[in-house]
Image (cartoon, grey):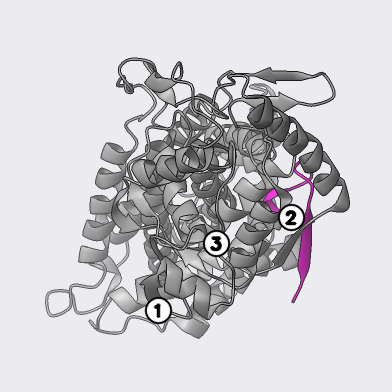
Amino acid sequence: MKKLFIDGKSLNIEDFINVARNHYEVHLTEEAKEKMQKSRDVVEKIVENEKPVYGINTGFGKFCNVKISKEESKNLQKNLIMSHACGVGNPLKEDAVRGIMLLRANALANGFSGIRISTVETLLEMLNKNVIPVIPEKGSLGASGDLAPLAHMVLVMLGMGEAYYKNERLSGKEAMKKANIKTIELEGKEGLALINGTQVMTSIGALAIYDSKILLKTTDIAISMTSEALEGITDAYDSLVHEVRNQTGQIITAENLRRILNGSKNTTKQGEKRVQDAYTLRCVPQIHGASKDAFNYVNNVINNEINAVTDNPIIFPDEDKIISAGNFHGQPVALAMDFLAIAISEMANVSERRIERLVNTEHSKLPAFLVKDGGVNSGFMIAQYAAAALVSENKVLAHPASVDSIPSSANQEDHVSMGTIASRKAREIIYNASRVLAIELIAAVQAIDLRGGKEKLSPATKSVYNLIRKNISYWEKDREMYPDINNAAELILNNSIVKEVENIIGEIKI
C-alpha cells in the first residue's frame, strides 16, 4: 500500500487523486501532530477556565451568545453533529467521499482548529480501511462551509449514521465494528472543527479539475480527428495569427493542433478546396483556448483551497489569539466552479457542432449519417441527437449557482455561496461533455474510413485511430450504439487517448 503523509500545506491534485481513486494510505506528519497539539492545549485551557469563546463553549449560529457549561460541552458537540446531519438525495460517490475525508484531515493538520490528534487519526483510519460514510449529495449552502454533508461524515465516527464497508451499506456502528475501528466521543470544539469547512465542494471540485484537464486535452485531439475527416484548413492555426492577439490559451491551442496534425495528408491549405472553414474548425484556438484560460484560473483556486484552513474560530497559539471570522465561506470555490462549468460546457457545445458537420452530407460530402445504405441504416443520426440533448442539458446546468443566496440561521448567516451546488453541477457537465467528445471521436474515425483517409493521417491522429478501432469496430450496418459511446468515453476518462498522442508529440499543453 502506497502512503501519503499530510501536513496541511503540501497536498496537490495528484496526491488527492491517489487517495480518492487509487486508495493510497494517509498519515499525519510529526510536524502536523505538534502543531495540532499546541492548538488543542489552547482549547482545553478555555474549556477549563470557562471563558466564553464561540464554538468552544457557546452555541452556534444564532445561538452564539448562549454560554455552555463545561459539563454540557460534550453534549453540545454531539448535538451539533446530529442536528446538522440534514442531507438529502443520493449518496455522494466513493471518490468524492474519500476526497472529503482527506481534505478535512489535511485542513485540521494545519494546527489551527484545536482538535485532538486522536480524533483526526480515527478519521484517517476510516479512510485507510475504506469505511465510506453515506453522505447525501444535497443540503449544503456553502457557508458556514459544508455543514450538513460533513455532519454525516462525523456521525459514523460516533457510531451513528450509515457507511459502506466492503460493498455493504451498514449502520455506522456496524461498519466501524466490522472494520475494527473504535468510535469516539467528541470533546470541546471538535464537532465544529470537523464540519465547519469547504471540503465537500472542494473535493468534488478537485475531481472535476482532474477530469477537466483530461477533457481539455482530448478536445484538441477530437478536433484534430475531425479536421482529418473533413479535410480541414490548417492555415487558421498558424502561430502568426495567434501571436497578434496574445491570448495564452489561444496560442497554446493553436500550437497543440499544429503538433497533433503535423504530417497529415488529409488536411488542406486555404484555397485548395475552399477558402475557409466554418467557425467550429477555424476558430478552435479561440474557443478551446478561452476554456483553457478559465481552467487555469479554477485550477489555481482549487489547489489553494485543498491546503486551506476553513474552520471557525481559528486558533493562533503562537499569537495567543482566537479569531472568529469567515474562512468557511465558499465564495472563492463557488465562483470558480461556476466558471469551470461554463468553460467545459462550451467544449461540449463546439464538439456537438462538429458532430453535425460530420453526419450532415451537405457539409461532409460523405454518406449521410456516416453509414452506407442509408434508410435501411440510420447510422450516426441519433448519436448526434444524444449529443444535442447533452449540450442542451449543460446549458441549463451552466447557469451559475453562485449568483444566488438565501439567508439562514435567523439571518445571522445572511449571504451564502452555493459552492457545493456549483461543484456538483460542474461534475455533471463534465460527465455529459465526455460523452459528447466520445461521439465526436467515433464519428470522426468513421468519417476517416468512409473518405479513405486512414493512410494519410498524421502520426498522432493515426495512433488515436488505431486505439479507437481496437476497441470500436467500423460501422458497416446499424447496431447498438450506446456500448460504443461508453467505450469511447472510458478511453477518454482513463486518459488512454491523451497518452497515445503524448507518447508521440510530447505533452499537450493546457
The x, y position of residue 378, in whole percent, is: 18, 72
Residue at the disc numbered 3: 266
Q: Which amino acid lies under the numbered mark 3 shown in the image of this protein?
A: Asn
Q: Nearer the viewer, mark 2 or mark 1?
A: 1
Magenta-colored span: 1-14
Q: Is there a contact, CB below 8 Å, between mark 3 and mark 1?
A: no
Residue in view at x 62 percent, y 42 percent: 253
Query: What is the spatial separation of the Cα atoms under label 3 and label 1, in whole angstroms?
Result: 53 Å
The answer to whether residue 450 of the structure is visible from this angle is: no
Where, by quadrant of the figure, is residue 295 drawn? top right
Q: Earlier in the sequence, mark 2 or mark 1?
A: 1
The answer to whether residue 29 of the structure is visible from this angle is: yes
Residue extending farthest front: 71
Q: Which mark is residue 507?
A: 2
Where, by quadrant of the figure, is residue 17 drawn? bottom right
288 to 326, vertically: above or below: below
Alpha-carbon neighbours of circle 2 within 10 Å: few (<14), some, or many (≥20)?
few
Residue at the disc numbered 1: 168
Q: Secondary structure at mark 1?
A: strand
The x, y position of residue 138, in whole percent, is: 32, 46
